[in-house]
Image (cartoon, rainbow, N blue to C red):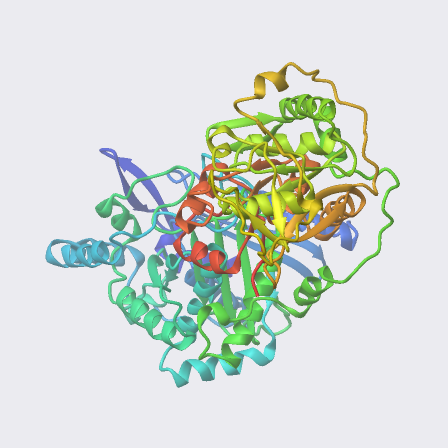
Amino acid sequence: ERAIDGIVERHQILRTRFDMVDGQPVQVVVPRLNGHAVEVHNLSHLSVAAQEAEILHLAQAEGRKPFDLAGGPLLRVTLLVLGERDHVLLFTLHHIIADGWSAGILFREFAALYRAYGEGRPAPLADLPLQYRDFAHWQRGWMQGERLERLIAYWRKTLEGAPPLLELPIDYPRPSLQSDSGATHAFRLPPALLDPLRALSRQHGVTLFVTLVSAFNVLLHRYSGQADICLGASVANRGRPEFEALIGLFANMLVLRGDLSGNPRFVELLQRMQAVCVGALGHQDLPFEKLVEALNPVRDRSYSPFFQVVFVLHNLPAGAPEVAGLTIQPLEIDFGTAKSDLTLHVTERDGIAAVFEYSTDLFEPATIVRMAAHLTRLLEDVVARPQCRLNELSLLGAGEYRQLLGWSAPTEEAIPANALLHADFEAQARKHPERIALRCGTEQLCYGELDRRANQLAHYLLAHGVGPEVNVGLCLERSPEAIVGLLGILKAGGAYVPLAPDYPPARIAELLADCGAALLLTQQRLAAALPGAMPCTVINGGFVPPLPPGEGWGEGNPNNAIDDRARHSLSTLCLDRDWPKVAAQPEQRPPARARPANAAYLIYTSGSTGAPKGVLVSHANAAASTAARFRFYPAAPGGFLLLSPFAFDSSVAGIFWTLSGGGTLCIPPESSRRDPGAIAALCAAAAPSHLLCLPSLYEPLLELARPGQLDSLQGVIVAGET
């Protein structure tokens, strides 16, 4: 107690309270105290396990206990007695009278006084030339007029146009009112990493702080996709030597605005961040609250202004002070709070120790554990390949690489005897008839309505001869009618043959003739340019268009060998114009006609010779492929943005993986499906969880998407090009 009294006597801020005078807080220093109260809890009767639990409980309760700013004291001391020679000493200070640097002063002075008093010596500490109130008085006098305007002008220019929010992928929706609920995850960087990081810093003329904050910026950039990143950084703000030994709130928050645009090399980013840090430190005297007051950013109660992620590099003593007869160890306590969305605390002590403090309103523990591993791997790659560009630096560890490779390992699964491609969709329609099955522009259909329309079409097709092994052409624009059409064909037992509306009419007629389709489903606006109810003729594998009246093929033409298999009549059903006839059919599901071995669809490839090359896929194989996706991918699509044309087999994956799992199929118009900006806007509006995309489209999509537009995506399949 004597050592604690000596510290309280020495630092006036520890005997300060705050009164309100004319609506303004005023600092009042209490005269000399008659001993500072120490609360004692005897836990010696408890088992070791019970003691550990009680230490945590009492420490957390003490940390949550409010202070009386007007009544004081703003320092509380608690002693937990674990045994005759084993104790825990808790110092609890209000942040208004102390900062992190102050904790180190308190720790060192307590050890020095305890040691001296225990040895019968007087206090060994020199008198303080200044008190915290002297700093406060100096700051008020200095922070005005031209100096203040110069500081404000610098920060106004620096933060002009800065993004208000760093949109990291979060596990939970951001609450409308920010809370302080949080947790921590501690980890250590490999010991062998510290010296290379120091060497890299020296080689490029920057501090270890700049190197670490640059790497952290890369991690945030890779997670968020943002190249303009505002990061909070805590600085001691003790520019004058006489302030270094004072307990008090000197620390200030700075905004470090990193520019990661243009995919620079890491060494280039080091120089960018060096300039940012030098500029910020040169203007660190403006208190953060004054910055917010002067710039008056648009406020949102769900997040902090200017930055939501903080980086702190702690400069602490190498170890605990030595006290004869005592072994002193710091006790780490997780108080279940977080001041920001995410804070990275780094301490250079016997290597590099790090702690992520994070908001539990936003992140799951597993996400932060993974982020810590990614940061570690990133730093390892930074020291190994500092000349790499930011998008080339590796975040993934060996385990994640193995997981990715494991996803491609083949597996064998038995195909159910009754497997039909559309069966799982029908099951979803029974279980969730009101759930949204598909969206296209402003139109949407729930599972029940989609199933009823497909049933009506199936009954109509059955009445017109469609059944197992009967191919039905499907040439429709990207619309709900296309999904109704293919489901109706499958329910009737037939196989659908998707044909792109932008194919030349001659090509469409050639494919219809090759597959022997007797019926074509289309739309009225397309029908005029498509083969109708007329003979289609193929000569030596090539389509012969209808001849104008009065013209004919000359005698002796060598290409007059007619393939009779391609000669047939074709009927056309326009699903928009002719729907009243379909709507007259029953809404009940027709009995299943197809068997697993029957064809489900026939898709044509371009073929190296130009001749039609159709690939027929059975219900069993298509159903097995769909089921495999649920096993292969970590999450089923809650929403799938279908960019693939219906005439490509990748459309089958998107359609049936989604509808078999109860998700929502999002069908963009033809004009948007190849436009990266339009796709990003669609993702923002429809919030799909999954996307299948060409590599040549995915790269510009990532570059053009604005912050937050792609946040809903949980899985992106990049495929379709070599």
Query: Along the horizontal axis of the image, is 448 left or right of 597?
Result: left
Foreground residue, 13 or 265?
265
Foreground residue, 297 or 75?
297
Image quarter of the C terminus: bottom right
Residue at 38% across / 74% down in the picture? 270
The vertical placement of 416 against 438, above or below, is below
Pinpoint residue 289: horizontal percent, then vertical percent: 29, 48
Residue at 63% across / 26% down in the picture? 450
The vertical placement of 186 against 77, above or below, is below
Q: Is residue 654 visible?
A: no
Query: Along the horizontal axis of the image, is 37 left or right of 705?
Result: right
Residue at 66% across / 26% down in the picture? 454
Pinpoint residue 162: horizontal percent, then vertical percent: 30, 52
Q: Is residue 598 visible?
A: yes
Pinpoint residue 102: horizontal percent, then vertical percent: 42, 61
Pinpoint residue 302: horizontal percent, then vertical percent: 43, 39
Give the farthest residue toward the front: 555
Give the farthest residue toward the left: 146
What is the count of numbered marks? 0
The vertical placement of 648 against 150, above or below, is above
Foreground residue, 74 or 573?
573
In the picture, residue 48 is in which quadrant?
bottom right
Query: Along the horizontal axis of the image, is 112 left or right of 56?
Result: left
In the picture, residue 469 is in which quadrant?
top right
Foreground residue, 346 or 566?
566
